[in-house]
Amino acid sequence: ILITSQNRKDINSLKDLKGQKFAEGTGTNNEQVAKKFGAKIVPSGDFTTSIALIKQGRVAGTVNAREAWLAYKKSNPTTGLKVKNVSDEEKPAQVVALFNKKSTKLRGKTNQALAKLRQNGTLSRLSKKYFNGDITK
């Protein structure tokens, strides 16, 4: 997603990042996306800091994961911020569990457990509880 101040009418897509200051975590996929579209990177240690920099007017915005936004807004005020889904412009990075290549049995059991939790609705319920939205889709 693309997060900016609601007052920023000039930033509505990733193409609008060129020359703009964007708060991004150093070495993250978000930083790579912002750089790819020409943003000037302002290093940020975490998501909360990135949002604070936007609210203070020190940066134009941030590119980040929808899940980070949903978790943040569950317990923080988001007044004055504008959010735009830009996943149709740039494919989002996938988040996966890491397994040792030799742990095929563990990976298989984990995948079975996740499939069961997805099928019985537990993953969706947990997502709604902790993110205020279903991030499993």
Image (spheres, rainbow, N blue to C red):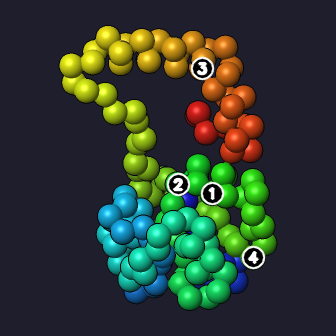
Mark 3 secondary-structure assignment: helix
Say which label, 4 or 1, has the lower sequence index: 1
What residue is pinned by disc 3?
118
Residue 15 shows up from this direction: no
- The type of residue carrying mark 2 is Ala
Q: Residues within 10 Å of mark 4 (few under 14, many from 20)?
A: few
Q: Residues within 10 Å of mark 2 (few under 14, many from 20)?
A: some
Q: Is residue 110 above or below residue 3?
A: above
Q: Secondary structure at mark 2?
A: loop
Residue beneath disc 2? 65
Report, in whole angstroms, how far the alpha carbon at label 1 lies from the one at label 2. 7 Å
Image spot of residue 53 (x, y percent): 58, 81
Tally of marks: 4
**Closest to the observer: 136 or 109?**
109
At x 34% / y 33%, what residue is drawn? 98
Question: Label 1 is placed on what type of residue?
Answer: Trp
Q: Which residue is mark 1?
A: 69
Q: Residue at x 21, y 19 (%)?
A: 102
Q: Secondary structure at mark 1?
A: helix
Pointer 4: what residue?
80
Compared to residue 41, the image places residue 36 above or below, namely above
Which comes sooner in the sequence, label 1 or label 3? Answer: 1
Residue 3, label in figure = none
Sequence-first tag of 4 and 2: 2
Q: Secondary structure at mark 4?
A: loop
Residue 63, x across and y down, in percent: 49, 66
**Residue at the (35%, 15%) spot, across then down:** 106
The residues tagged by marks 4 and 2 sit, at their Cα atoms, a distance apart of 19 Å
Along the horizontal axis of the image, is 116 left or right of 90?
A: right
Residue 41, given in percent of the width and then of the height, sits at 39, 79
- Horizontal side of 66 relative to 100 (left or right) equals right
